[in-house]
Image (spheres, helix red, strand yellow):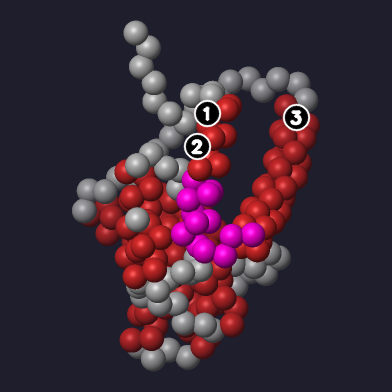
Amino acid sequence: LIAAIYRLTKMENKNTNAIIDAIHFGDKVPLLLVPAIYLSTVITHLFGGSAGREGAALQIGGSLGCYIGQLFHLDEKDMRIATLCGMSAVFSALFGTPLTATIFALEVISVGVFYYSALVPCIVASLAALAISNAFGIAPTHFTFALTAAPRLLLLRVAALAAVCSLMSILFCVTMHGTERLFAGRIQNPWLRIAAGGAIVVVLTLLVDTGDYERRRHG
């Protein structure tokens, strides 16, 4: 169903990378990416799939920001800022964290490069989006953490955990890209690739059988 949506809207291979390319190279982000990513995320959650909200927020916000920039005939530099503002705004409205939304949008597009010229516009867009979402009574998810006395060597343990997580994230990204290239070379039909990927996930779930990703009832 999701593949059909992307096929009908002609949004195949359009993802967060399309937003990043729009900022780096001035590419246009199609507005149809908004309903495509929205519907696909809703359908994924509806059927129990795992899909993060961060990527959807960046894609929807970036698409809207780019479209509004086109309506006002902004130049290339201002188009980048408009795209970043859209990303920050939707992220802020979704998570209720305007400062985090601004920093995340500015840093996620390029490692080691920070667009200072977009800092103030993105903060303003984030605060405005948060105010509008609050006015409509849409409260973001809040988490409460209870802090206890820190044990010895806690900072070293946290630093070690951060290093391990960094290595695991690199391994995850390399595996994802490698698997994508492998499947694209072995299975030419995209529909068959989707079916094969889903079948592998189901088989792995049955083999591991942890129950972490499924709801069970115990009598």
Is residue 174 magenta-colored? no
Residue 110 point in image, percent of width and height: 64, 68
Q: Does the rendering let one see residue 125?
A: no
Q: Are marks 2 and 1 in contact (CB under 8 Å)?
A: yes
Q: Using the image, tell me which numbered label, if any, was put on residue 202.
A: 2
Q: Taking 163 as reference, is 77 left or right? A: left
Q: Taking 93 as reference, is 164 left or right? A: right
**Pointer 1: what residue?**
206
Span colored in magenta: 186-198
Q: Taking 199 as reference, is 132 left or right? A: left
Q: Residue at x 53, y 78 (%)?
A: 22
- The amino acid at mark 2 is Val
| Vertical position of residue 218 compared to residue 14: above or below | above
Separation of marks 2 and 1 at Cα, in angstroms? 6 Å
- The amino acid at mark 3 is Arg
**Pointer 3: what residue?**
157
Residues packed near mark 2 inside 10 Å, few (<14), some (14 to 19) or many (20 plus): few
By secondary structure, the bulk of the magenta-drawn segment is best described as helix
Q: Using the image, tell me which numbered label, if any, was put on residue 95.
A: none
